[in-house]
Structures are given as C-alpha cells and as structure tokens.
C-alpha cells in the first residue's frame, strides 16, 4: 500500500464572477467546492492567470476547470498553458471536468475547436437533452432524458476532438456535454450555478443581452432550480474519490 497522502482534487480557476455576485455569494471556486462535497480528498485551487504554477500532471487526483468571462479563441498565454497541461492530464486518464470555458478549453486542448456560437449566446435556464451515448456514461448515466440546466455562453465547442463522444445538447447548443476517453468530460452548462446566481447574471448583463436581442426580463422569469445538473459535481467527486482510493490500495 502506498504511504503517500492522497493527491488533491484541483480546481483550476480561469475566471472571476462579477463583483456584485462575489460579495454576496463567493466565486466560481467556492460554488464548485460546495457542489463537489468531497470528504476524502484535499481540494486545491490554482489560478494560472495570476501566475500560479499548475501541479505536475501525475500529482493530481482529479481536475475541475472553471468558467471564465474570457474567450478561448483569444488564446491568452495562461489559457494556452492550461490547455497543454490539460492534454497531459487527460493522457494519464485522470478524471477531468471542464465547465463552460473549461468545456471549450478541453475541446481545444485535445485538437477540437472553440469559437463564437454562430447563432449567438445562450442564456438562462435551458433544457438539456441527453444523447443515446449518455445512457452508460459514468457521469451522466441515469439522469432524466431531459433536465433543466443554467447556461450563459457566447462561445461553444464548435468541433470536438477526434474520438470524443457527444453526450448532450439543447435546442440552441449542439454540444452541451462530451466525453474524451473514459474519464474526461466537458459541460457547456453550469452545474455550479443555482437559480439566484443565474438570475444575478441575467440582471447584471441585461444591457449586453439586449444588444444580442435577448429579453432579460423574460429570461429572468424563466429561471428555475436545476437539481439534476447541480448533482453532477458530486457525481464527479465520487468518480475521483473511487479512482484515488483504488490507486492508494494498489
């Protein structure tokens, strides 16, 4: 049995929420940590934008990549560095979960393409529909065929990496979830957003949404709880914990 302590579940922080939300609710990493709810693994937060060094790929139990107000297609140096690191982590079959920006970055990192959605942004509580491939997926398997999820994005994973499996879509977004290999997932929607957070985003971005011909008041009215989507963070944590325990006892 290994005597080394368990490696951390790492939250790679690539963005910040709006100040008004952060003052009341905390930031992306706090929402994600709350949803993960891990009791057996240490959590670590690293922020490559601030110059944090990403851990060695063989010294992480799992990875969650946050959303961001940045754009993957701008290829910021910190983003490209994180993409190259992600490719190494995935190659080691370490569990990875990319959320929104993280979803798009994961696609880009593995040879796909991220860019502006040709039909514009998708905002609010949307209906996500599972593809047939999700039926036996370790993360999404067992969810309702359709479930509500919080979404806010201007860019998308326009082309998936070779060998990737599409798992879910919406009426607006062709790829709301995908998997690469056995344990690397991208989610375009936000499992860490609750209804209050989603409503706050809509209110703060009302002017921007109007410029994209979206009715903020109607979107705000349509916000509702998204329990099935929120539960995916805990599911992912259990996947990471199970793999870490197996490695510790090997």
Image: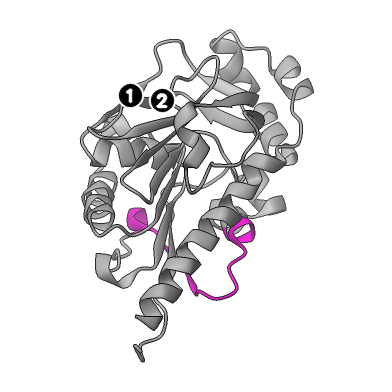
The tag on residue 56 is none
Is disc 1 placed on a helix, strand or loop?
strand
> Percent from the top left, x then y, of residue 168?
49, 28
Q: Are marks 1 and 2 in contact (CB under 8 Å)?
A: yes
Identified at 58% across, 7% down, the residue is 213
> Percent from the top left, x then y, of residue 108?
27, 36
* Screen quadrant of the C terminus: bottom left
> Percent from the top left, x then y, of residue 224?
76, 31
Mark 1 vs 2, N-terminal side: 1
Seen from this angle, which residue lies furthest right?
221
Seen from this angle, which residue lies furthest front?
136
Identified at 30% across, 63% down, the residue is 54
Between 169 and 54, which is closer to the camera in this rendering?
Answer: 169
Is disc 2 placed on a helix, strand or loop?
strand
Q: Which residue is mark 1?
A: 115
Is 20 in the magenta? no
**Image: magenta residue range:** 33-50
Image-based side of 158 in relation to 150, left or right: left
How packed mark 2 is, by other alpha carbons closer than 10 Å (few <14, some 14-19, many 20 or more), is: many
Q: Which residue is mark 2?
A: 155
Q: Image quadrant of residue 7?
A: bottom left
Q: Would you place residue 179 above or below residue 157 in this image? A: below
Q: Would you place residue 172 above or below residue 165 in this image? A: above
Colour mode of the rendering? one colour
Q: CA distance from mark 1 to mark 2?
A: 5 Å
Identified at 61% across, 46% down, the residue is 19
Image-based side of 87 in relation to 201, left or right: left
Q: Image quadrant of residue 51?
A: bottom left
């Amino acid at each position: 049995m290994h005597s080394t302590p368990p490696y951390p579940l790492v939250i790679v922080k690539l963005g910040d929420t709006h100040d008004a939300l952060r003052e009341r609710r905390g930031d992306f990493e706090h929402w994600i940590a709350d949803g993960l709810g891990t009791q057996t693994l240490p959590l670590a937060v690293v922020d490559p934008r601030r110059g944090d060094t990403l851990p060695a790929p063989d010294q992480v139990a799992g990875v969650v990549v946050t959303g961001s107000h940045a754009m993957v297609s701008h290829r910021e140096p910190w983003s490209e560095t994180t993409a190259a690191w992600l490719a190494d982590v995935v190659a080691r079959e370490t569990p990875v979960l990319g959320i929104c920006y993280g979803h798009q970055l994961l696609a880009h990192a593995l040879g796909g393409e991220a860019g502006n959605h040709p039909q514009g942004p998708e905002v609010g509580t949307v209906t996500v529909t599972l593809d047939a491939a999700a039926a036996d997926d370790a993360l999404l398997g067992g969810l309702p065929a359709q479930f509500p999820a919080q979404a806010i994005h201007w860019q998308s994973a326009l082309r998936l990496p070779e060998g990737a499996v599409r798992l879910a879509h919406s009426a607006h977004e062709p790829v709301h979830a995908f998997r690469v290999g056995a344990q690397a997932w991208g989610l375009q929607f936000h499992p860490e957003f609750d209804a209050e957070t989603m409503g706050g985003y809509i209110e703060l971005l009302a002017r921007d949404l109007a410029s994209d011909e979206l009715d903020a008041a109607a979107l705000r009215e349509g916000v509702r709880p998204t329990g099935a989507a929120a539960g995916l963070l805990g599911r992912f944590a259990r996947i990471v914990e199970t793999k870490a325990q197996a490695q510790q006892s090997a």
